[in-house]
Image (cartoon, helix red, strand yellow):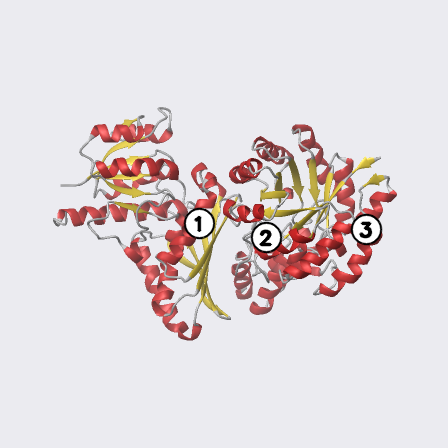
Amino acid sequence: MKHVRLVDTTLRDGMHAVSHTLTAGQMAVIAKGLDDAGVTTIEIGHGDGIGGSSRQYGFSRETDEAYFKAVSRVLTNAKWCTLLIPGIGTIEDLKVALEYGVGTVRVATHVTEADVSEQHIKFAKQAGIEAIGFLMMSHMAPVKKVVEQAKLMASYGADIIYITDSAGAMTPDEIKARISSVKSAVDQPVGFHAHNNLGLAIGNTLAALEAGASLVDGTVRGLGAGAGNSQLEVLTAVLDKMGYETGVNFYKLMDLGQELIDPIMHRPQIISNEALAIGYAGAYGSFLLHARRAAERFDVDARDILLEMGKRKAVGGQEDLIIDVAIELSKR
Amino acid sequence: MKLKAAILGPGNIGIDLMIKILKRGNLELVMMAGIDPDSLGLKMAAERGIKTTTEAIHGILKEGNIDIVFDATGAKAHTMHAPMLKEAGIFAIDLTPAAVGPYCIPSVNMVTDSKVDNVNMVTCGGQATIPIVAAINSVTPVKYAEIVATLSSKSAGPGTRQNIDEFTETTAAALAKVGGAKQSKALIILNPAEPPLMMRNMIYCQCDTSEFDDIVKAIKAMVTKVQQYVPGYHLKVEPYVDSDYVVVAVEVEGAGDYLPKYSGNLDIITSAAVTIAENYATRKAGGAK
């Protein structure tokens, strides 16, 4: 049986969908449920990773440290994971995570900017934890460039390379081309992180596995930025039917979704018009709620803002540009 | 008599500094120092009749009779250079995040203390945003300042990329120390879009917004002040109030001296450095030493 490692990011990517309002207590209870269901890697914290709590992205309800502390106490088998985007989070921030026994750090850069991850990946390896190189907005670079950047991260010592469809903008063929090329260019296992803006999260995840990925991400109820991620309980069921072994009990995940995730959701995790605009335009998933807010303030259509953000080739983290775009659209 | 200056580090910043110093003509640029004989910066300096050395700091110290050194190497290197320059009695302008000496933002805290022999230029993001934070803080205390600097990938050299943590940490520290914010945070984003975008800085200041009219006046006056040494500095998003925050964005169009106009991040820090050197020269001429 073919094994797939499932990485849960309900408590990190899902934070975007709840505007980073989860309490440390809520996180701990959900993390424990995931652990009980057999998930072995659980990513937690602000949606933009350590140091992400800000006016630009939204302040999280509690500090990074409070989340780390609460979750680290309740896990039995699973290891917890943190996201670090250089330019937002720093090695100093990562040291706090190390105090609470972080097992994995995903060092994330825009798909063309892998060289800013060197310090952080090397530091993580020196500290003895798993380091994943996470290439965000992978749709914005041609295959050759993605391969070059993946090799850079591998050369810094990354244990795993991730292709990340942050905008949920890619089709299965585009995913396959990236995964298989990276897979044949590096010795490391390759992972895939999907978003559902075009309704393709599960399908693209299957395409990634077919092309050679051995780790994939999901979130319970699909909770995440934009239209959300691969819905983990659904993905687990699908993989089970296809003969993949995940070690995760999807029945327990369904219960967890109903008992713990449904009550905390701010709105149903659907492909809203704005989320579809994000996938179509190739804009960063977490722009969604910021665009909605700016649309209301400056009386324009949020979809127009998002399409324009895509046109301007905004990268992850450029939430501030939404304001400029909204003001300019309002003057047209 | 013009003071004699040397540039240490012939990368993007060093080359831009060279062109600015030659253009303005207020200092005598006597040397460009590096380590790689094939570096573009050393070649460009030689073409302009400026002495070059591949012995880095040692070449400068051997040359002697130099008043000012611009250090555009790296944070670790400057930590080694600083005591050597001090011993030689050379005024050091540090363009790395080493921050051995006090931070200096010319429009906010021009360093005029004759005992100071080493000043730090913070970061490009700091040079672009701290003036605005200081302007707001002059009207009403800034409780929290957060800035987001977006640079075109092309304009961010290996120095910036390998020191990305130092960039956010140094900028945040200077937002508090020079800008006056009680608490602070800095973020940096690199964008590879073509054509390259201009350096953009978002500034969020949490403060009492009831004196907004005075805040706007102070911001506009500050923009004019910065424009005296960085003509391409301008407001991108006019100040507005969002709950208890004043939000404003500035853009920096470069002079296009070395790298094209999108590299305003380069211009703002090199222009500030040359302004400080000229100010030092004027003070020395006035017998301040």
Task: Report the Cα–Cα distance between label 2 and label 3.
Answer: 25 Å
Choose mark 3 or mark 1, whichever is in front: 1
- Residue B44: which disc? none
Residue carrying label 1: B169
Return the residue nearer the eye: A312 or A121: A121
Report the chain holding disc 1.
Answer: B
On the picture, is A307 further left or further right than A207?
Answer: left
SS category of the residue bearing label 1: helix
Q: Position of residue A121 (x, y in %)?
A: 56, 38
Residue carrying label 2: A48
Q: Position of residue A249 (x, y in %)?
A: 82, 48
B201 over B24 or under it: above or below: below
Choose mark 1 or mark 2, whichever is in front: 1
Number of marks in picture: 3
Badge 3 density bin: few <14, some 14–19, many ≥20, Cα 10 Å: many
SS category of the residue bearing label 2: loop
Q: Identify the mark nearer the N-term, 2 or 3.
A: 2
Quadrant of the image containing the N terminus of chain B:
top left
Return the residue nearer the eye: A263 or A24: A24
Q: Position of residue A67 (x, y in %)?
A: 62, 56
Residue carrying label 3: A234
Report the chain holding disc 3.
Answer: A
Name the amino acid, label 2: Asp
